[in-house]
Image (cartoon, rainbow, N blue to C red):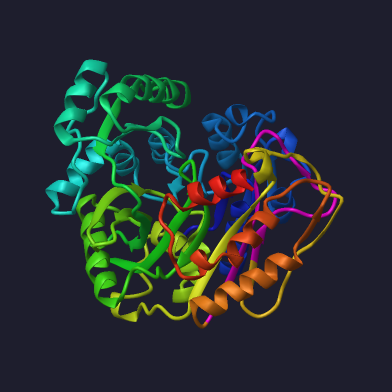
């Protein structure tokens, strides 16, 4: 039985995990950098260990320090949260070698699915719809041009390893391809130390639909319905919701069964997400599989009533899934807004600083996942997201109204945030009607520039 978990992360996700552990009677260990010595997660855990200087590479990405902290404190498991080391196969392998339970899939699965070209081939072999693209990683420009012309422009160029929009570029013609390919390759080399790329036909204006899956060690796999993550900028999600306006019961059943088949093909265990691109004609294509908990997991928790963090821990502890597929029911509607320390009117420039005063809303159907407090300093060393505001209502229209009202109550003084920008999205008629695709933010930002 897992009795003590080290949380190898920071911010709101670290607090989310600590709270789940507390409810399960499991002790927790927080790790923190020198910049995070006053951070809330370090104060809420049963124990806290400093693992290095402020830069992430010296602290939250320092595998040896985190493993040492785990062993010194007697923790028998590590929950990586999202970001940082959550999808690092070498870190998972280190945990396995040290007899530490890694709360996630095993290292071989992470490595296999982290390689986008290999993941794509795995899904294709399992009969999962995939976008036409390169079968093998591409490193040479001339080979990239040949493949691009064979699959047809526009094409999207992606790093074999990586995520978060880094090493990802779109070329709409042969004239654009050379510049975009070399730029993406340079970004990939700098961010991930790997210059291998792969190419796919670029689908114009789809919706970004992802299915949450849970899989135990006994071959049981279920899906918990879909999330619509189409509102994004530079491949970074901003607003997510569940369920999607574009997915009815028939399509949900079909795509859910495909997601389960994909997870089984990868021999997956724990929580994961199958990401699809969905076209207006209801055709859909596998994009990638994320081998960790997602930032937007709360919207799924609210419409299903299933605690994903607790399920992750139970699965890692060798237990069977707590639910069967026929026990999963989607009810109501949930929306999540990511509240960031950034200025949308200055190209979303990060705005670190100290919070002078703050007020966060509450009430029925409102959830705040956050690590901030009055007097807390938003560090320039990490991601600008400081809170997630999540609402739940009986339908989408009521959820939008609730989110609009809740955003209007938020007060965070001392730093610039994106709250007003999110508030404006809730007022837009096209958003209310569900007329959103992954190009939606391009339209919104263009209108802002024209104004």
> Residue 205: x and y, percent?
35, 51
> Residue 310: x and y, percent?
49, 65
Q: How many marks?
A: 0
Q: Is residue 280 above or below residue 56?
A: below
In the figure, residue 221 lies in which quadrant?
bottom left
> Residue 171: x and y, percent?
33, 31
Q: Residue at x 22, y 45 (%)?
A: 131
In the figure, residue 193 lies in which quadrant?
top left
In the figure, residue 326 lies in which quadrant?
bottom left
Query: Viewer-proximal residue, 425 or 194?
Result: 425
Q: Is residue 409 left or right of residue 439?
A: right
Residue sitting farthest toward the bottom = 394
Q: Residue at x 22, y 42 (%)?
A: 120
Q: Is residue 92 above or below residue 260?
A: above
Residue sitting farthest toward the front = 450
Asked if residue 383 is among those painted magenta in the image, a careful observer would answer: yes
Asked if residue 264 is among those painted magenta in the image, a careful observer would answer: no
Q: Is residue 128 above or below residue 350?
A: below
Q: Is residue 173 left or right of residue 354?
A: left
Residue 307 can be seen, yes or no:
no
Q: Is residue 419 above or below residue 334?
A: above
Query: Viewer-proximal residue, 317 or 418?
Result: 418
Q: Is residue 287 left or right of residue 75?
A: left
Start-end of magenta stretch: 368-393
> Residue 83: x and y, percent?
51, 43
Q: Residue at x 69, y 51 (%)?
A: 41
Q: Is residue 436 left or right of residue 173?
A: right
């Amino acid at each position: 039985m897992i009795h003590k978990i080290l949380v190898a992360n920071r911010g709101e996700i670290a607090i989310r995990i600590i709270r789940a552990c507390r409810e399960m009677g499991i002790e927790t260990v927080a790790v923190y950098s020198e910049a995070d010595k006053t951070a809330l997660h370090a104060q809420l855990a049963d124990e806290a260990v400093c693992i290095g200087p402020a830069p992430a590479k010296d602290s939250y990405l320092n595998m040896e320090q985190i493993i040492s902290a785990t062993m010194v404190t007697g923790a028998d498991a590590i929950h990586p949260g999202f970001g940082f080391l959550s999808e690092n196969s070498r870190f998972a392998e280190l945990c396995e070698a040290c007899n530490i339970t890694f709360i996630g899939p095993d290292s071989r699965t992470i490595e296999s699915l982290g390689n986008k070209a290999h993941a794509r081939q795995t899904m294709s072999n399992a009969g999962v719809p995939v976008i036409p693209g390169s079968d093998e990683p591409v490193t040479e420009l001339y080979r990239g041009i040949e493949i691009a012309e064979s699959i047809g422009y526009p094409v999207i160029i992606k790093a074999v390893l990586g995520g978060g929009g880094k090493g990802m570029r779109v070329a709409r013609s042969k004239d654009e391809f050379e510049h975009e390919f070399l730029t993406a390759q340079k970004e990939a080399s700098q961010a991930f130390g790997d210059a291998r790329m792969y190419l796919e036909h670029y689908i114009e204006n789809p919706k970004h639909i992802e299915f949450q899956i849970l899989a135990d060690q006994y071959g049981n796999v279920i899906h918990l319905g879909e999330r619509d993550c189409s509102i994004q900028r530079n491949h970074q999600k901003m607003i997510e919701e569940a369920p999607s306006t574009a997915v009815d019961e028939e399509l949900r059943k079909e795509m859910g069964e495909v997601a389960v088949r994909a997870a089984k093909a990868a021999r997956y265990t724990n929580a994961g997400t199958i990401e699809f691109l969905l076209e207006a004609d209801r055709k859909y294509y596998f994009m990638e599989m994320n081998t960790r908990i997602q930032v937007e997991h709360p919207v799924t928790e609210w419409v299903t009533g299933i605690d994903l963090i607790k399920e992750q821990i139970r699965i890692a502890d060798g237990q069977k899934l707590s639910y069967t597929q026929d026990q999963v029911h989607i009810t109501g509607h949930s929306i999540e807004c990511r509240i960031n320390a950034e200025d949308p009117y200055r190209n979303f420039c990060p705005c670190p600083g100290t919070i002078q005063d703050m007020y966060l809303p509450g009430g029925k159907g409102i959830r705040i996942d956050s690590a901030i407090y009055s007097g807390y300093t938003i560090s320039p060393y990490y991601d600008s997201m400081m809170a997630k505001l999540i609402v739940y209502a009986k339908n989408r229209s009521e959820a939008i109204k609730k989110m609009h009202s809740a955003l209007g109550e938020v007060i965070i003084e001392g730093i610039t945030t994106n709250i007003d920008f999110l508030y404006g999205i809730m007022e837009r008629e096209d958003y209310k009607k569900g007329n959103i695709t992954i190009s939606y933010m391009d339209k919104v930002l263009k209108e802002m520039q024209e104004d």
